[in-house]
Image (tube, grey):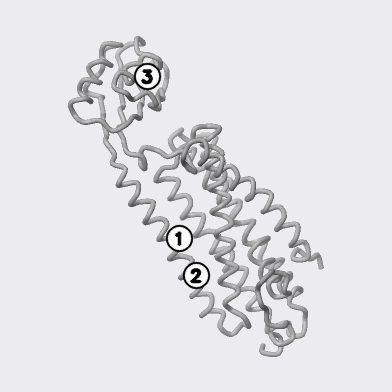
Amino acid sequence: MFSLVQKRRWFFLISALVIVPGIAIMIYSWATTGQLFRMSIDFEGGSIYELKFTNAGATEAGIREVFGRYDDENVIIQQLGEVVDYRWSVRGSFVDQSVSSQLVRDLGQLAPLDLDSLRIERVSATVGQEVTRAAFVAVLVVAAVVTGFIVIAFRQVPNAFRYGVCAVLAMVHDVLVVSAVMSLAGLLFGWEVDALFLTAVLTVVGFSIQDTIVLFDRIRENIPKHLGQPYETIVNRSILETIHRSLATQLNAFFIMIAILIFGGESIKQFIAILFVGLLTGTYSSIFIAVPLLVAWEKGEIPFVNRQPLETADAEV
């Protein structure tokens, strides 16, 4: 029988080769921009202007020059739709109503504005901070609940606490990979962390935990069925029995996300791309990180962690 868990050191090395450079990228982003990620207006606070001109007189340089008059030179300008639509989206710093009115008046000098289509939204940074705090608390609660659930559900299995810890570590692995990809995309492509990014992270956490619990549950079922066999053999058998289910489930989601990336709108592509990366690393971590970690812990390969001898564990079963 082909043994996946015997290759666990290679799997750990692959993850390290992704996570360590990812952490370095986030540190570089922090050193150069003051932030781990490029933050959107949802977190920074500011104003969003959706403008529609009636002719091609307005250009990106002209719009930027107008905002520069009001000490807002780092605006993000994006042309929406087809070029002939003359529609622009501008994200700038927060300004009060009087300044905003003057700014719109100056923009109208570039080209006539369609005032009926004009939309201005103001976002407070407090909202973004509250959302971030809620997402962080949600991840902590998920980690605690999952650990507790696994300890209770796996109480008849020796060392049930290890299953919960390994599931949480696999989840942290996925969050780190997604965060590294987002930080790199922010440096290279200007991607910004917004509320949809937090939604993608929480979705990835849910998928990762679900896949891991399915694998652990099969291990729990196989331990009493194959008494006397080495723990490593039982775990490997469990992986081979469930891997087709995990891959089939995830492939269906991957095909849908690829279709959205190719044919979907621009506003959703960043969210789908991050979700795709997250589900990919979630599938990988469930099979090649969580379960191998469990075996490494049982065999005493994790430094500074005491273990119960395998013979004692088998005897308790």
User: Is there CB contact under 8 Å for labels 2 and 3?
Assistant: no
**In which quarter of the view is residue 304 placed?**
bottom right
Question: Is 134 on the left or on the right of 304, as rendered?
Answer: left
Residue type at the position of mark 1: Val
Sequence-first disc among 1 and 2:
1
| Residue 138 figure quarter | bottom left
CA–CA distance in space, label 1 to label 2: 10 Å
Left or right: 196 in relation to 130 = right
As drawn, 73 above or below 202: above
Relative to 107, residue 181 above or below:
below
**Amino acid beneath label 2:** Val
Outermost residue to the bottom: 315
- The answer to which of marks 2 and 3 sits earlier in the sequence is 3
- The residue wearing badge 1 is 139
Q: Quadrant of the C terminus?
A: bottom right
Inter-mark Cα distance, 1 to 3: 39 Å
Mark 1, other Cα within 10 Å: few <14 / some 14–19 / many ≥20:
some
Q: Secondary structure at mark 2?
A: helix
Q: Which residue is mark 3?
A: 64
The numbered disc on residue 166 is none
| Residue at x 51% of width, y 80% of height | 152
Helix, strand or loop at disc 1?
Answer: helix
Q: Which mark is residue 146?
A: 2
